[in-house]
Structure formats: structure tokens, C-alpha cells
Image: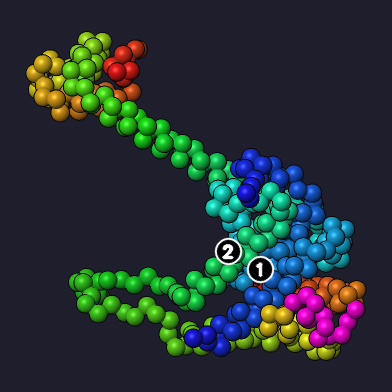
Amino acid sequence: MKSFLSREQIEQAIRTLPQAGWVRLRKVAAAYCRGRPSDAQDLLQRAFTKALDASRQCPTDVDVVRFLAETMHSIASDDAKRRRRHPELQAVSLFGEDGGLALDPPDCRPSALQVLADEQEASRQKQAIIGLFADDPVAQVMVEGSMEGMEGEELREVTGLTKIAFASKRRLIRRRVEKAFPDGWTP
Amino acid sequence: MTSPADKDEDALARLSQALAEDILAASDESILAEVKDDGGDPAAIAAAARALFEQAAVASNKALLADAKAAVAADRRSSAGVVQLDAAAARRRLARLLEQNPDTAQKLTMAARKGKPGDFSDDEVFGLLEDFEDLGISLPEEPERER
């Protein structure tokens, strides 16, 4: 049977993280931060909250930093899904300008212009990241492959790199993206 | 149907995951060295992250306390329900409470425009007991609860 850390255990495990553990969590938060609606700090704090209130439980055999990283991934993924379902929620008055009940309240759905702006933003961000590697075709292939969902060995085979060279290139990619977007994808 | 924007969003999300995996795979030394290379202070970043955790812990503890209070209140209501099973015992308890708390008794019974437990209906007896409980007044010993 799978066992999980208790509230006291998870609190203790997080509180006693080494300095590198805290820094790693902050970096992971920035990697998963997609701008709206939360920035990296907010994302990290929400992950802590979920761990503490046990809405997500850490298995005893999972490293607590990995657990919190996966929790941030889950939160970011849920946020993205929510944005798609409700691109822009706007407060809409049910009362007309004369104070009476409006029988035909304004449409709160995103306008065609808003939808177009969202599409353009995601596309622009994607192209900006790919463009960071215009001088490095192998890295560009790896970035595009990652975006397509290729991972690990499959991606390495496509590039023809050795394991060490592949890991090194992957690190180079991350560092270049981190420097270009220190707080996530927000421009 | 997946829109072009959704495809781009998904692509960015997959890249995010790949980057996060690389962060998790890196050694402690290289993670700290990267921060210094970028002109950052690992100690300050760690302290800020720790502060976020402490804020979350305080908020979580407050929520736990509120849950505990709610559970105690629910338990009290449940206990009051047990007393209500025995109307005669409730009248005895009310008589003792009225006797031991004359000032409060006067206010409550004036509101009810009656004086003695025998003057009250069962519902009024239970209502007055609840009023006493709400005021935090109880008997030193409550033998009826044990029945």
C-alpha cells in the first residue's frame, strides 16, 4: 500500500531543505510560470499550500523537491486549461444605465480581437524561444522536438548526440531560455 | 477541436516540463553556480522561497484551527441533541441553571414571560438550555449527559 508523508513530516521535509533545494524550487517555478494568472512566486506558494493542506500528498518514496515540482506542473496545467475554458472572465452588470434590470446584458465572452491576441501571443512566444537558437541547429532541433513532446532517448537519437553531449546541450538550452526569460515566459 | 493557439500553448508547456526536468537533474553545485553566474545571490533566493513557505504554513495553520473550531461547535450541537432525548432531564437541568444563575435566569425568563421550568413547553426548555449554552453557562456537573 502506498504511504504518504504526514502534515508534520512534509512540513519538516520542506523546512529542512538545503539552500540548493530552495533555489531549485524557485527555478522550477520560473520554468512553469506562464505569466497570467500567477507569477513564479505565487505558483511556488500555491504548491506549498497544497502540500500542507494535503490536497496533494507526497509519497514517502518521492523526493520532496520533485513532489513540489510536480505539484507546480499540475497547478500550471490546470491554470492553462481554465484559461482556455474561460479566456477572460469579466464582471457584467445585470442592470442597465437607467438602473433597471437589463434584459440583454452585454456578452462577456472574449471578443474575436481578444482570441486573436491570445493566439498571436502564444505563437510569438514559441517563435521567440526557437529564435534563441538560430545559431545552433542541433539545439533548435532539440527545442522543437521537446515542444512536439519528444523526450529522452527518442530526442537524443534524432540529434545523433552522445549521452554526455546531449545532456550538455540540454543544459545549454535551459540556461539560454532562463537568461532570456528569467521570470518565465512573460515577455 | 484544438486551435492553433492551443497547439502553441501545449508546445510551450511541454518545453517547460523539459526545462524543469533538467533543473531537477542538475547537481546542487551547478544549480547554485548558475545563480551566481547570473549575478544572483543563492542565499537571498533561498531566503525568499523559505519566507513563502512560512507564509503558506501560517495560513494553513489558521485554516486547521478554523476547522478544529468548527468541529468542536458541531460536537457541541450534537451533544445538545443527546440531551434533548430526555425532556424530564432537560427540565431538571434548566431548573438548576435558573437557580444557580438568577441574573441570567431573570433576563431569559423575562424574555419568555414565564418564571419556572414547569411553565415552559418542552421546546421552550430546550431553547433556554441552548441560550445558556450559547452564553457559555453550564452546570459544574451534568449528570443528565451521562444518561
Identity of the residue drawn at 30% across and 71% down: A93
**Of A69 and A86, the residue lying toward us:** A69
Identity of the residue drawn at 75% across and 87% down: A131
Name the residue beneath numbered marker 2: A75
Q: What secondary structure predominates along the stretch shown in magenta?
A: helix
Name the residue beneath numbered marker 1: A32
Identity of the residue drawn at 78% across and 75% down: A152
B35 above or below A161?
above
Q: Quadrant of residue A32?
A: bottom right
Q: Is residue A110 magenta?
A: no
A34 above or below A19?
below
Q: Chain of mark 2?
A: A
Badge 2 crowding class, 10 Å Cα cut-off, few under 14, some 14 to 19, many 20 or more, is some
Left or right of A5? Residue B22 is right
Badge 1 crowding class, 10 Å Cα cut-off, few under 14, some 14 to 19, many 20 or more, is many
Look at label 2 and name its amino acid: Ile
B100 above or below A19?
above
Callout 1 touching callout 2 (CB < 8 Å): yes
- Residue interval drawn in magenta: A151-162
Q: Quadrant of residue A119?
A: bottom right
Q: Is residue A187 visible?
A: no
Image coords of residue B89 (percent x, y): 22, 17
Label 2 element class: helix
**Of B69 and A103, the residue lying toward us:** B69
Identity of the residue drawn at 20% across and 14% down: B92
